[in-house]
Amino acid sequence: MPRAPRRIIPLLAGFALACGTGVLAACGAPDPPPQDGQADAPATGPTPETVTFPSGDGLEITADLYAGADPDAPVVLLFHQSASSRGEFRSVGPALARLGYHALAVDLRWGGRRNDVRNGTAARYGTDSIMAAVDAGTGTPWPAIDASYGDMIAALAWLDVRGLAGPRYALGSSASAMLVYRLAAEGHVDGVSAYSPGEYDPARPDRVRTWAAASRVPILTVAAPAEEELVGPVAAAVGAPGSRYVVAGEGSHGASILDVGQANLGTLLSFLGHHTGGPPARSVDTLAAPDGVALVLDRYQRPDTRGVVALFHQGGGSARGEYGFLVAELLSRGFDVLAADLQGGGDRFGPPNRTLAGAPEPAGWSYCDARPQLDAVVAHARTVAAGRPVVLWGSSYSGALVVRAAADGAPVSRVLAFSPASGDPMEGCRPETVATRVAVPLLVVRPSGELEIESVAAQFEAFQAAGHETRVVPGGSHGSSAVNPVRSADVDDDLARILAFLDPVGR
């Protein structure tokens, strides 16, 4: 059996329980202390709506609903760890709801209390007596844990009754992290986040990996710093595209990792945003460009903004498809966000380009022809910013165009250009030819693989010679995908350093 991450005590021959804070916590008390001496997670945001619904065997299930943006917004089902309750998510639930996701924190029958919230489902099921028997060596937790899967299925059915029709993502914590892989394997959800999963049942030592291997939906698997031996084998079995395995920089076990440090929550929000096209709490603006094209933009707002970051996609892409992973991070750093669909796009990253759907490119159109559209978005951003700074972030062909806009004196504060395009597609609007005219801070980012191309290396050197900041990130993903942790490996540090380029804005 893989080594469990925290204080292990043998309770029955053939299996072990992690006392108080571990995977199958019992230890004679249904109310485990905060993990490793941490304080309880602070309650933030509005009070949730507490609801009940029946499980398949008739047991009444208690859950807290943190309402999101609209009925079609994605839903995140939150399942707690052993000896815990829906109170485990009293900070995570509101954080998701503020971004427009619906969050349903469910009391599973194998539970107890967390953050002063008693598990109503467990109380009805009589879990206290089961835990006492386990603690005395006369019982086993597995029937109750296995039956908790039926509680998860009941929660999904309740979403239908409530009319919440958006994509569904399940988040599991420790014991429930095992079961969310089953939800994925059986096709009940659109994605999974699993915190501290492991093969905890020695009588069935391969079942979690079997579920993981059978899954066809993206899975985020997260281990605490001391849990790689426990979690790594499960994560290695995941083969679904769009999946990630992350060892958190801090935290102890299960979903409590999310309450420690902004980076841990950011990992979850980035994963969700990548697969849902960004947070659903947004408005959709339609803007008339000088060429008559109706541009479609997503607008994300904060009550106390430092400024606006305008995001532009690469060729064949869309704003939601390329930047869904990034929006929550920019919002957390104090920025409003405008994510614009220009012509020259498509659905290569999933979500379609809505501007292109209404206005296909005419014959003879080139990437340079998108410049008036980009300028219109910049003017709109200035209006939205209401006197605060505007930052331009471009990718590939739009990376070239944001450099050109800055060189022509666009009223912006800073510019980030990822893989700025050059060569024949940009004939007449190459970015390197105006590098010396850019007066505002400019950061040019390239994946290392692209610098093996002679013309790209020459362009990069031209920006360096003009005194602009440059950064090389590992790998070969093009444009802003170079720092998307789902599309490119080991980029968290690079992305953090790139985002630090924005730190002076609005200060």
Image (tube, rainbow, N blue to C red):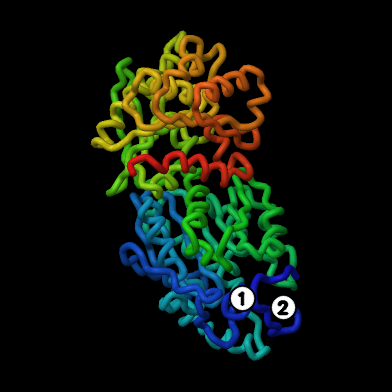
* Residue 349 visible within the image: yes
SS at mark 2?
strand
Q: Badge 2, how many Cα within 10 Å: few under 14, some, many 20+?
A: some
Q: Residue at x 53, y 82 (%)?
A: 127
Disc number for residue 292: none
Q: Disc 2 or 1, which lies upstream in sequence?
A: 2
Q: Circles 2 and 1: CB distance less than 8 Å?
A: yes
Residue 24: quarter of image: bottom right
Q: Position of residue 145 (x, y in %)?
A: 60, 73
Q: Which residue is mark 2?
A: 15
Residue type (three-letter) at the residue carrying disc 2: Phe
Q: Residue at x 41, y 78 (%)?
A: 116
Task: Give the vertical position of 463 relative to 65 (above or below).
Answer: above
Q: Residue at x 59, y 48 (%)?
A: 217
Q: Residue at x 64, y 91 (%)?
A: 136
Q: Badge 1, how many Cα within 10 Å: few under 14, some, many 20+?
A: many
Left or right position of 128 against 50: right
- Between 95 and 409, which is closer to the camera in this rendering? 409
SS at mark 1?
loop
- Between 443 and 60, which is closer to the camera in this rendering? 443
- Between 8 and 414, which is closer to the camera in this rendering? 414
Q: Can you say which quadrant of the picture contains the C terminus?
A: top left
* Residue 315 visible within the image: no
Q: CA distance from mark 2 to mark 1?
A: 10 Å
Q: Can you say which quadrant of the picture contains the N terminus?
A: bottom right
Task: Give the vertical position of 501 relative to 344 (above or below).
Answer: below
Q: Position of residue 499 (x, y in %)?
A: 47, 42
Q: Position of residue 417 (x, y in %)?
A: 49, 28
Q: Which residue is mark 1?
A: 24
Residue type (three-letter) at the residue carrying disc 1: Leu
Q: Position of residue 234 (x, y in %)?
A: 69, 58
